[in-house]
Amino acid sequence: MAAGECIIYPCYFNAAYSRAEGRRVPRSTGVKAPVLTDLERALKKAGIPFRAEDKHHPAHWTRREGRLVVEWKEKKELLIRKVAQRLEARK
């Protein structure tokens, strides 16, 4: 991973998960069962460059949900909030 990159996983935005299971947004901001294509769509809308990888979150290794490597130089929390705002439209 190069400098200026952040990794995000669909589980960060899953309203059905607890914080301990990997959710990184408030339950009210999360969505039901997000998939990688939802995150890709949100990043494209925001104009943020990314690439998809066929990797999985270490805590959810059996799910094989994939991850996105995003070109981002600011704090990761800002990126997660920005993606969550764009996902909310999907609810």
Image: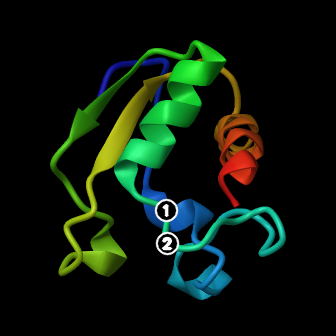
Does residue 54 appear left or right of residue 46 in this picture? left
Q: On screen, 16 above or below 41? A: below
| Residue behind mark 1 | 34
- The percent coordinates of residue 19 (x first, y second) are 65, 81
Quarter where residue 32 is shown = bottom right
Residue 83: x and y in percent read 65, 40
Whether 48 is drawn above or below 11: the answer is above
Q: Quadrant of the C terminus?
A: bottom right
Find residue 61 and report its image quarter.
bottom left
Vertical relation: 24 (above or below) 48: below
Q: Is 73 positioned to the left or the right of 7 in the image? A: right
**Residue found 49% across the figure and 62% down from its top:** 34
Q: Is residue 7 visible?
A: no
Q: CA distance from mark 2 to mark 1?
A: 4 Å
Residue pictured at 64% horizontal, 66% vertical: 31
**Residues packed near mark 1 inside 10 Å, few (<14), some (14 to 19) or many (20 plus):** some
Point 54% across, 28% down: residue: 43
Q: Any mark on residue 43, and which?
A: none
**Taking 67 as reference, is 86 left or right?**
right
Q: Which residue is mark 2?
A: 33
Circle 2: is it few (<14), some (14-19), or many (20+) Cα within 10 Å? few
What's under tag 2, amino acid-wise?
A: Ala
The image position of residue 87, as x and y in percent, is 66, 48
Which residue is most to the front? 90
| Residue at (49% x, 43% y) in the render | 39
The three-letter amino acid code for the residue at tag 1 is: Pro
Q: Quadrant of residue 24?
A: bottom right
23 sits to left or right of 82: left
Position in image of residue 55 (x %, y %): 19, 53
Seen from the viewer's position, the closer of residues 64 and 74 is 64
